[in-house]
Amino acid sequence: MTRMQGIAASNGIAIGPAFLYRVELPEIPVSSDADPTEELERFEQSVDAVRTHLESIEERKRGQMHADNFEILDVQKELLSDEEYGDKIRTLIRHQGRNAEAAVQEVTKAVVTEFSMLEDEYFRQRAADVADLGNRLIRNLMDIADVDLGDLTEPVVLLAHDLSPSDTIGFELDKVAAMCTEAGSSTSHTAIVARSIGIPAVVGIGTMDVREGATIILDGNEGVAIADPDDATLAEYRERKTRDEKRREELLAKAASPAITADDVHIHCVANVGSVDSARTAAEYGADGIGLLRSEFLYLERPRLPDEEEQYTAFSQIADCLPDTTVVVRTLDVGGDKSVPSIKMPKEENPFLGHRAIRLTLEEPDLFEPQIRALLRTAADRDVRIMLPFVSTLSELRTARERIATIHTSMTAHGTAVCDSPKIGIMIEIPSAAVMADAFAREADFFSIGTNDLCQYTMAADRTNSKVAELANFLDPAVLFLIKRSIDAAENAGIPVAMCGEMAGSVIATPLLLGMGLREFSMSPSQLPEIKDAVRGLSVNDCRPLVDECLQCATASDVREILRSFLDSRLSRR
Amino acid sequence: MKETTLTVKHKVGLHARPAAKFVKAAKQFDSDIQISNITRGGDRVSAKSLVSLVKIAVACGHQVHITADGSDEDQAIDALTEFIVNTMEEQP
């Protein structure tokens, strides 16, 4: 039995067999006097097997996926017979006495290295396709099960080093019971995906040494993973899992009713979504609307930009999952850790401080205009609002407003059905915007505080680096000061203010935020039932004194202690 | 030997799927077919290899030079021109 401690990234408990996703291969034997005939035959057999496997994926996914997603399969099939790949491997076997797996590894490595050095991001990404193909061949040659998520019969606990959006888009998510990654923090992509589909996840667990198929207990509440548990542990966790599921069911049953505090204040609990599926989940989990629609999903894993029509269809579909509610759409937010194939972004020394999000889209009409046009059309008969990400100066907001007004005027002139006057707000996620919140509040229609970036930029701590992620803590008094300032500014100017970061879905922060005057909380759908339940057990009046108390603290751990004991005294009484 | 110079107008260039299709088209001919990316400069490579084609990274707006040498060189140049000028524009 091995017990590993990581960061709790998504609640719930799962027990299932380990599925190692693209993990490092074992040491590969290298020979220089293998029998060429025998090795060639082995190689051809593995080529056939891999080709058949690729075709079966294609067959299964046909109709389910956007046509662009087939690209990788096409490329891989072609590579198998390429003179610079498949044929080179054959030559190595034939003339250098190399065993098949060593030959595959050698050629794969060489091609991957060459592709990785290409200047063009888009072409550079093909390195991953070649690496993946090499992996498949070697796994087949060494008899290491190369199961595809779609072939699985029972749900698995997926273990990986780290997962990117392009990894998770190919997953058959109903076969994934839980996810666990060696790297990452509670705001990394894995955590966000797990929460959006409501499965447990533990991240940042460090190096894992787990064999394929081993029984794994994954406790997303405590951030614990246990491999090969003994009978007593297994029994204990089965019981915990049952209790946990029961509690969630109870919460879920109450999720649809509004979150009203004990002193009668209605708190809007809305969802962060990033696809039509997650919008449906949000509706099931009792979302009062959508507080953050991340529009990036439209751009993932496809070589071309989505056009206006496609965006309009997607936005309408999502908005219609939650009819008669407000839907806040964030304009394209790429750069930093988020890149998409259709947008060329030169390698930057410091992508998190670089040319990204609104800085990029305002310079590229091809990115900005179709999206705005689609949004104005979606808003014609729905309450859809436009949110600008990564705003750091007032001039960015002004420029965006002017551009949107121009687009709006021209669409109206052409008789296109659009909303009367677009509602344009900003994300408060850069410290400069929080510091200047009063000025922004006079010109923005609403605020949404994005605590993940706000923490990382205030504390100068990369949230994807598990060594420093701890510093980017939303309970740090420095961050709290900026949050309070933003909420006050919005209140004074009479505009709505919401919060859409990790903090909004964390019960520990709920009383403090209620005390500060926040009335709209936007979070992953799976967090809604629990936050709604907490809100119902609190009263705003009671929470108000917490604000001064917490802001006078010198450290995040002092703040946590105050909030912990407050919550214990209030919520346990029920 | 036959040759031609073309500008690739497809939005993502000779990338991934279009590149795989281009290679398939080239492989139908016996002639030795080579391609180079004039805009980036550099190597002349086999048009029948996807790996080589990715390495010369032909993006939108780039000019390519294609040569064909062999019994069916005329047909090869015609077919590949047709592919770059028309087929690629229609197919994503």
Image: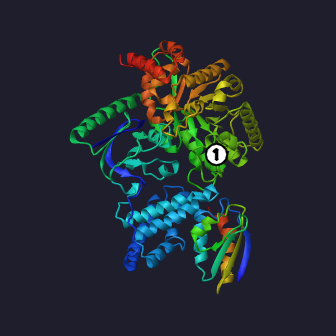
Q: Quadrant of residue A216 in the image?
A: top left
User: Could you tell whether A171 is left or right of A361 in the image?
Assistant: left
The residue identified by callout 1 is: A349
What residue do we see at 69% from left, 26% from top? A440
Image quarter where the C terminus of chain A lies is top left
Q: Quadrant of residue B3 in the image?
A: bottom right
Task: Provide residue A259's location: percent of width, then percent of height.
Answer: 47, 23
Task: Provide residue A377's location: percent of width, then percent of height.
Answer: 66, 41
Q: Residue furthest front?
A: A32
> The disc labelled 1 sits on which kind of residue?
Glu
Q: Secondary structure at mark 1?
A: loop
User: Could you tell whether A180 is left or right of B40 in the image?
Assistant: left
Type of colouring: rainbow
User: Could you tell whether A189 is left or right of A26 in the image?
Assistant: right
What residue do we see at 23% from left, 42% from top? A230
Q: Residue furthest bottom?
A: B71
Q: Residues within 10 Å of mark 1 (few under 14, many from 20)?
A: few
Is residue B5 visible in this depiction of the protein?
A: yes
Q: Quadrant of residue A418 in the image?
A: top right
